[in-house]
Amino acid sequence: MNTLTIARKELSSYFRSPIAYGVMCFFALITGFFFYSAVRFFLQQSLQTTMMGQSVPLNVNEWVVRNVLSNMSVVGLFIIPMITMRLFAEEKRTGTIELLVTSPLRDGEIILGKWLAAFILYLAILGISVLNMLVLFAYGNPDWRPMAVGYLGLILQGGCLLAIGTFISTATRNQIVAGVATFGVCLLLWVLDWVSSFESSTLFTIISYLSVTSHFESFARGVLDSKDAIYYVSMIVFGLFLTARSMESIRWRA
Amino acid sequence: MIKVEGLTKRYARNVAVDHISFEVEKGQIVGFLGPNGAGKTTTMRMLTCFMPPTEGSAQVAGFDVRENPMEVKRRIGYLPETPPLYPEMEVIEYLNFVGRIKGVPKGSLKGRIDEVMQKCAVTDVRNKEIGKLSKGYRQRVGLAQAIVHNPDVLILDEPTSGLDPHQIIETRDLIKGLSGDHTIILSTHILPEVEQTCQRVMIINRGKLVATDTMENLSSRLHGAETVAVEVLPRDGSPSPQWVESVQQKLERVPGVSRVVPKDAKDGRARFTVESQKGSHVRPELARAVIESGWQLNELHGMGLSLEEIFLELTASKDQATSEPAPEAVAQEAVK
């Protein structure tokens, strides 16, 4: 109940500042561009294959949806810091954190409420890209199941990065610092995947396992792998756990 | 209502609050007085469960801040030094939010909000964005926030800081009006504020409680005697040093006077501070002595016993005892 109260307050403040609109606008433009170029490329390719006389048509899911979803997962790395940076940093700066902490709320309720608000905003932003996909349904017949799995992957990946961003936001009273640090961590978690191409030693496999994007691959292909889902869910729990620890330290140090 | 025993907050390098003990009874307004950095805010934060104490215990309405923080939080209204406001919210929306997180039952929330808005005189700005309000209004919204769940105890950290004189008076009256229903602790470093609003005062300096007493007791304990300011003009001409001395001697001979301190002599007048013994009424005698000597009495007024003096006396004596080296040591240092 208290969690929902907090979430509602956070959401309303998102939509009262330019943040929500800015992020949505940015996301709509970027994903729109990716979608357009993917479709464009797909049309060229299918035209070529037909001219070369191949009878099997190219798969829309394979050529468009998968690429667009992968691109969106990278765009997510950019928008998530913008969503989470103010969550705790702003409350610490203005002193409203004192109101929350001295109210009869559990830390968990505050944290979950804030994360939930960020998550809902993220879902709304993802919702914009569904419009692009609807265009595909209007002019072709893509399979909706792998697409749904892809979106589930985006949702899980977002939830996990949002949890990390929420944690980082508790560490500072400066939104910008929180945003930049979150972006740095997101980027790191993305590029960690690249080490897997260096060599296939155990160490590099572990490092690559930690990367958020490496777990997205299978989702983008439309494959629901429990291993990857477990990774995301446990990262969400871990991020929120760190947030709780950090909030405790706000009290001890304040 | 509030019981604090040996409350201590220690940081890595310094002790912010050092074994403070006090009790506050139901319905009292207690002033928490001390210079900036004395440990007022830290003490309040421990009482409101914002931070845990390093040592000692504090009980609010019978609940310990460490063992039962939820129950304590339910019974405390807290206004930090900067009111915890969300600038993008409207006043009514903000109070609604605070009411919910403070656990006001949904059914009675609306009525309760109307009530506190009326009490704190913010009804006329109910639909305004908090960020657009003046500082005085914001402070009142902050107070409304603190009392929205009708807490037993109200803790106000420098409730009048940064307000203009008019707003200060308004806020003080508001706090006085709240004292019937709530037990109030307010902190301040402005001395007259305590004199005007509080029944009891606790003076804290460098993390230690220096004095805790009622206003009347505190004044009479420190100063038994009355201090009078006297301004005298010679019959003609400007005051010469010899003349000032003769006036001083004359005043010293008035019965009941214990000490006469010449202040300054300029613009043709000389000023003295006369300290008298406890229980003697020297003012008429002082006036007669001046007039009978053929001088002109320009001014004669009692200086009262301001909290300021009490405070300086209490804190200064501690300072001397702890920080200043003894005069002998200084002298020896000079010889070397």
Image: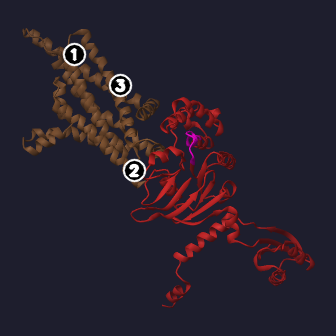
Chain colours: A brown, B red
Residue shown at 19% from the left, 26% from the top: A219
Question: In terms of image quadrants, where is residue A147?
Answer: top left
Query: Mark 2 — residue?
Result: A250
Q: Give x and y (percent) for residue B296.
A: 89, 73
Is B148 in the magenta?
A: yes
The one nearer the camera, A147 or A229, is A229
Query: Mark 1 — residue?
Result: A144
N-term-proximal mark, 2 vs 1: 1
**In the picture shown, does residue A148 fall above or below B29?**
above
Tell whether label 3 touches label 1 (CB within 8 Å). no
Dot 2: element:
helix
Question: In terms of image quadrants, where is residue B132?
Answer: top right
Mark 2 vs mark 3, foreground winner is 2
The stretch in magenta equals B144-153
Q: Give x and y (percent) for residue A16.
A: 47, 30
Query: Mark 3 — residue?
Result: A124
Q: Is residue B297 left or right of residue B309?
A: right
> Outermost residue, bottom direction?
B335
Bin the neighbour count of mark 3 within 10 Å (Cα to Cα): few under 14, some 14-19, many 20 and up.
few
Q: Of the residues shown, which amino acid type is indicated by label 2?
A: Ile
**Distance from Cα at disc 2 to Cα at disc 3:** 31 Å
Q: Of the residues shown, which amino acid type is indicated by label 1?
A: Trp
Bin the neighbour count of mark 1 within 10 Å (Cα to Cα): few under 14, some 14-19, many 20 and up.
some
